[in-house]
Amino acid sequence: MDIKSSTNTFCCKEIAGTSEAIGKVINTIRKVSVSDASVLITGESGTGKELVARAIHNNSYRNREPMVVINCGAIPGELLESELFGHEKGAFTGAHKARVGRFELADKGTVFLDEIGDMSPDLQVKLLRALQERKIERVGGIETTDIDIRVLSATNKDLAASITQGTFREDLFYRLNVIPLHVPPLRDRIEDLSILIDHFQEKIALRMHGYNKKKFTEESIDRLSRYSWPGNIRELENLVERLSVMVESDVVMPSDLPEYITRNSSVADTTSVSGVFQSGTGFNEAVEQYQKSLILYALEQTHWIKARAAELLKMNRTTLVEKIKKMNIEQEQEFPFL
C-alpha cells in the first residue's frame, strides 16, 4: 500500500487527559493517521468515539477533504441504503429527483459509520461489496461510480457476539476491523476528571461571553471521582454545562451537585465488592443500594419519565413504580425547570 503522509503536525488537542489509558488511545491515533487502513472504534456510549474518528481524519493526508458522518442506528433501514449510496429519480416512492449519497460526498475524504452494529444484514452485504470493489451503485441505477474513501466505523456493541448470533457478517467485521481501537470508559481514566472539567469549561467560555471558570472544591472532585459515570464523557460534559449555568458563585460545592451523583458517590465504596466487606454492609443492604443507584440514574437520564426509565432498566413500569415507593426515591426540586 502506498502510504501518503499528512501535511499537518500531529495534534490531538480535542482529546483531553494525561492518563495512561487515554495516552494509549492518542498513540494509536498517531500511528493509524498516516495510513489508509480501516479502523473499528469500540467503546461504551458517550466515550468520545466520534471525537477519536475526527482526530484520525484531521491528522491524515485526507484532512483537506470532508469527513462524512453516518449514524447507522438513527436512519431507518429502508432509507440508509439511499443515504449511503444515493438514488436515481423514481427509484422509489418519493424519489422525485436524483440524490448523491454520502459515499460520493466523501470522495477523497473519510466516511465515519457510527453505530455500525445496527446495520441490517442485507445492507451489510452491499456495504461489503462497495468496500471491496471501491465502487458504488445508486439505488435504482445501473451505472457504477468509483469512490476513493477511508472508512472509519464505531460501535458500542459486541460485534463478536453479533457474529455468533448471525446479526453481523464476519467478513464485513474483518474488513472494518483492520485496526481495532478501544476507547476506555471514564471510570477507567478517572484521573483525567479535573482535566476534562477544565477542558469543557474552556469550551463553554468560547461561546458564553463573560463566563468565569469555576473552581471545584476537593470534596466536589472527590464526590465526582467516586461516581460510576455510566454516561461517560458525554454525561460529564452535560453536567459541567449545567453547573456553569446554575451555580452563581465561582466555586462548585458538593451541595451544587445533583443528588443522584452525591447519593451514588456516598455509597460507592459500599456497593463495590471489596467495599461491601470493608464497610460491614450486609448483602441485602448492598443490593438495595445498588438498585437505588441504578434507578436514580435511569430517572435522571429520562427526566423522571417513569415509562422511559423502566424501558432503560428493562423492567415493567409497575415494578419500577413499586421500587420507587419502597425506596422513598423522590425527584430533586432544586432545579424544577431543567
Image: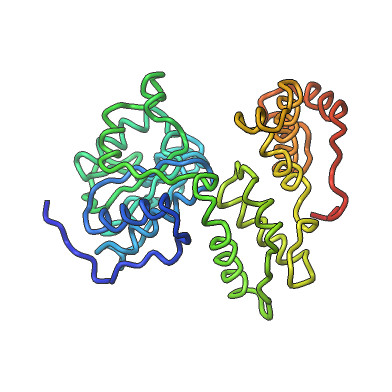
Residue at screen point 66% across, 60% down: 240
- Please name the residue shown 71% across and 66% down the image: 244
Q: Is residue 39 left or right of residue 255?
A: left
Q: Could you tell me which residue is drawn at 33 percent across and 27 percent down?
A: 169
x and y percentages locating residue 131 in the rendered image: 25, 41
In this orientation, which residue lies closer to the viewer: 289 or 199?
A: 289
In this view, the residue in front, 162 or 103, is: 162
* Quarter of the rendering containing residue 129: top left
- Work out whether 44 lies above or below 22: above
For this rendering, which residue is in front, 2 or 28? 28
Q: Residue at x 43, y 30 (%)?
A: 158
- Whole-percent x, y for residue 17 in the image: 47, 59
Q: Residue furthest bottom?
A: 210
Image quarter (top left, top right, bottom left or bottom right) of the C terminus: bottom right
84 relative to 185 in the view: left or right? left
**Residue 27 at x, y percent in the picture:** 32, 55
Taking 114 as reference, is 137 left or right? left
Residue projecting furthest to the left: 2
